[in-house]
Image (tube, rainbow, N blue to C red):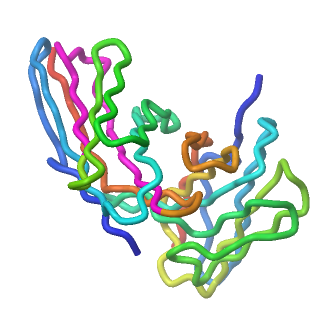
Amino acid sequence: DGGITQSPKYLFRKEGQNVTLSCEQNLNHDAMYWYRQDPGQGLRLIYYSQIVNDFQKGDIAEGYSVSREKKESFPLTVTSAQKNPTAFYLCASSILAATYEQYFGPGTRLTVT
Amino acid sequence: ILNVEQSPQSLHVQEGDSTNFTCSFPSSNFYALHWYRWETAKSPEALFVMTLNGDEKKKGRISATLNTKEGYSYLYIKGSQPEDSATYLCASNNAGNMLTFGGGTRLMVKP
């Protein structure tokens, strides 16, 4: 089945540790995105990538890093510099066109204590 | 950062009621307006993508309209059912491939 997968579904980390969230797609989409959702707020864009080996900061990139070594994969690292890392993280992919919808993964809920 | 606003934030309706909610977005450099449905424990799924002023789209009991000149879109649900319970997100694309999402409207339909 074509789709986008994220793992794990739930992730727990101690404060001060870096953690990497996985995102894989087999839709052959050029563009991939990472969003963060906090309670009562909409999705906010962390990073996006439109082509392999290239990515751009979104609205809230501080404390995060990404890589795009393969078209199918766009892992997100939440670093210890991120002040409020506990959140729900969604990965998405799309064709490179404004009129095409984004396809979302199931999300990863990260809890940092 | 663009401002995309949705109202109301949450809505409780009775099964069979029709309902509607609003998304307002910047009208400058507008490319497209997206609506997504996000059910609990699932991924957000695209409902509609609209680009032209006056666009109307329909999928079953759900329809949407678009006014790009004044920067708003309405989502209508006719005869709400419990399975319509979800958070409805709108997102605006203003120049480029990036979407700016609103905060969502959480709809709860009581049987």
Q: Which residues are magenta?
A: B73-94
Q: Tell me where residue A50 appears, x and y as whole percent.
A: 74, 60
Left or right: B59 with respect to A102?
Answer: left
Residue located 54% across and 70% down the image: A112
Quarter holding the N terminus of chain A is top right
Report the residue that reaches farthest toward the bottom: A81
Numbered label tally = 0
Give percent across and percent down for residue A65: 71, 76
Give whichever of B95, A34 is nearer the camera. Answer: B95
Q: Residue at x 86, y 61 (%)?
A: A52
Identify whether B69 is placed above or below B83. below
Look at the magenta stretch and give its main secondary structure: strand
Query: Residue A40: image x %, image y %?
Result: 28, 58
- Find residue B50 and report its image quarter: top left
Residue B45 shown in magenta: no
Q: Is residue B21 above or below residue A48?
A: above
Left or right: A64, with B47 as reference point:
right
Estimate the x, y position of residue B93 in percent, counting from the top left: 47, 56
- Residue at 69%, 50% in the rendered image: A96
A25 or A78: which is nearer to us? A25
B34 horizontally vs B6: left or right = right
Q: Quadrant location of residue B60?
A: top left
Q: Is residue B84 magenta?
A: yes
